[in-house]
Image (spheres, grey):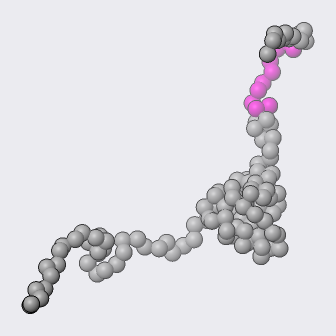
Amino acid sequence: NQRRPKAKLKTKGRSSNRNANNEHAFTKPTAPVVREVELPETITVGDLASKMSVKAGEVIKELMKMGVMATINQPLDQDTATLVVEEMGHKVSKLIADNQLEQDVAEAVNYDGDQTTRAPVVTVMGHV
């Protein structure tokens, strides 16, 4: 009973994707990425985290450092969100009001001509 050495099979694996000097192709970015964030009057912790491209847990940790207990679905006011964004090294590009869309439409619409009143429209609904 003599044992024969097993033949090694050539397999393609992860090691074939590496460079000759055994390094990974990915290099870690050295400088932090600073993002510009637009903040509405209220924003949830999860939405704020996604706008800054960080995990929600990191935002919650930052809030806890500031003395605010928050969950991922809890809404934050504009002032608190601004403090969190600046503490995490990002910039607030602009603050957006909740009725910003209505204000933009009101400014864009130009009423020319004579405005007259008219009778109200009455709708009669049948059996529903």
Regarding residue 33, the answer to whether it shows in the image is yes
Magenta span includes 7: no
Left or right: where 118 falls relative to 98:
right
Left or right: where 90 falls relative to 28:
right
Residue drawn at the location 80% of the way across and 37% of the way down: 103
57, above or below 1, in the image = above
Residue drawn at the location 79% of the way across and 16% of the way down: 128
Left or right: where 119 falls relative to 69:
right
Regarding residue 87, the answer to whether it shows in the image is no
The residue segment tinted magenta is: 105-115
13, above or below 112, in the image = below
Q: Residue furthest front?
A: 1
Residue drawn at the location 72% of the way across and 73% of the way down: 61
Left or right: where 43 falls relative to 13:
right
Residue drawn at the location 82% of the way across and 57% of the way down: 77
Q: 112 and 72: which one is in front?
A: 72
The image quarter containing residue 88 is: bottom right
Q: Quadrant of the N terminus?
A: bottom left
Q: 55 and 94: which one is in front?
A: 55
Q: Residue furthest bottom?
A: 2
Q: 102 and 93: which one is in front?
A: 102
40, above or below 88, in the image = above
The image quarter containing residue 56 is: bottom right
Residue 121 placement (x, y as % from top left): 85, 11
The image quarter containing residue 35 is: bottom right
